[in-house]
Amino acid sequence: MADTTIEPARPEDINADEFETKEIDASSFADSTSVTSSIYQHSYENGRRYHSYKNARYPIPNDDEEQNREDMKHALMMELTESVCLTSPDDHIRQSIFGKLYFAPIENPAKILDLGTGTGIWAIEVADQHPSAEVTGVDFTPIQLNWTPPNLKFVVDDIEQDWNYGPEYDLVHFRQVFPVLKNHSVVLKQAYDSLKPGGWIEIQEFGGAAHCDDGSVPKGYSVHTFLDLCQEALSTFGSNFRIGNELEEPLKNAGFVNVSAKRLKVPIGTWPRDKRLRLVGLYFKIVLAQLVRPMAAKPFPALGMSKEEIDGLVAKVEKDLANTGYHAYFEYIFWTGQKPE
């Protein structure tokens, strides 16, 4: 458990318009790489678009709304780790006004592999940060931007099948991928084999549970119910929603040494006193709120829930997410491990 307590905001700490934003054209984020037409096959359920490549195992949509949610998670992570960089000067981590893309202790990586790259935003930024490095981003849905740095390429592939991305990587990176994987041990073994001796793996995951340190969250907090149902629903697809808490042993079993986890608290909503954490909390509240209906559209019906039951739960979750009197938070966990020299 992360050991830093988040101080709640006082009324005088908050300005009503402090996070006002301009409208953004979401279509500008929706361009994709040029690949074969079969890769672009989609199915539509409950008004949302799902990918059909490799039998459409992934139970979350891949449409513009979901892509924007993924990019908001990236902004959240950068704000969260910027706070760490600015407040932990003795932590021996690289300083950056834009936050940290990774915590693995690598100075000048020559080859970086990003698995489950999604929209490609992390791969693009790490390629910009390391212009001499060769960066490869892999995902089975082609939603990445056409414009990329010259040292970055995207590959459309299923990372639970045999890899063919080459050896000798300095860093193999995953972010919010493991909760939807079925073959964790196979993926970790291939990551190990792809690294050069001394190279690092980093896996960044939410813990999948809501916590509270001050007793402000009531016993019937609907977000707990929602998250428990996410765990149950994704298990019907062969996945583990809360695998992010349980990666130490799998990493060690794959052969990694120096395995460690850095845990940061992510508030749900704008209740913290610290303005940066209020912004992180705003992002995360939106991310969670936008996850509720996709989960309700496909995974929850797989549990046999009726439309009325799902609609009732959605309404309760949306109401509880908006309540700043509930001082709830998630953990964001950064797992790192090294291939022996």
Image: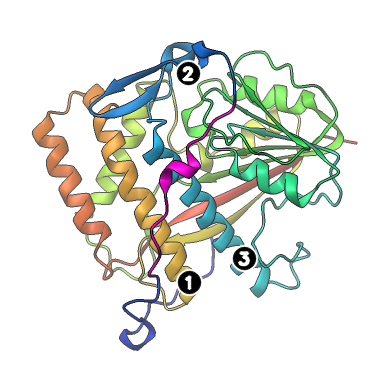
Picture quadrant of residue 81 = bottom right
Tell me if residue 122 is in the magenta stretch: no
Q: Tell me what residue is drawn at x 86 percent, y 48 percent.
A: 108
Q: Quadrant of the C terminus?
A: top right
Q: Nearer the viewer, residue 172 or 208?
A: 172
Q: Are marks 1 and 2 in contact (CB under 8 Å)?
A: no
Mark 3 and mark 1 lie on one chain; the one further toward the N terminus is: 1
Q: Please tell me whether mark 3 or mark 1 is closer to you in this view.
A: 3
* Left or right, residue 90 beside residue 55: right
| Numbered tag placed on residue 40 in the rendering | 2
| Numbered tag placed on residue 5 in the rendering | 1
Q: Which residues are magenta?
A: 20-33
Marks 3 and 1, how far apart at CA: 18 Å
Above or below, 324 relative to 261:
below
Mark 2 and mark 3 lie on one chain; the one further toward the N terminus is: 2
Query: In x, y percent, where is residue 152?
Result: 73, 36
Task: Kindly tell me whether residue 219 is visible in this rendering.
Answer: no
Residue corresponding to mark 3: 82
Q: Tell me what residue is drawn at x 27 percent, y 58 percent.
A: 321
Q: For numbered disc 3, what is the local secondary structure?
A: helix
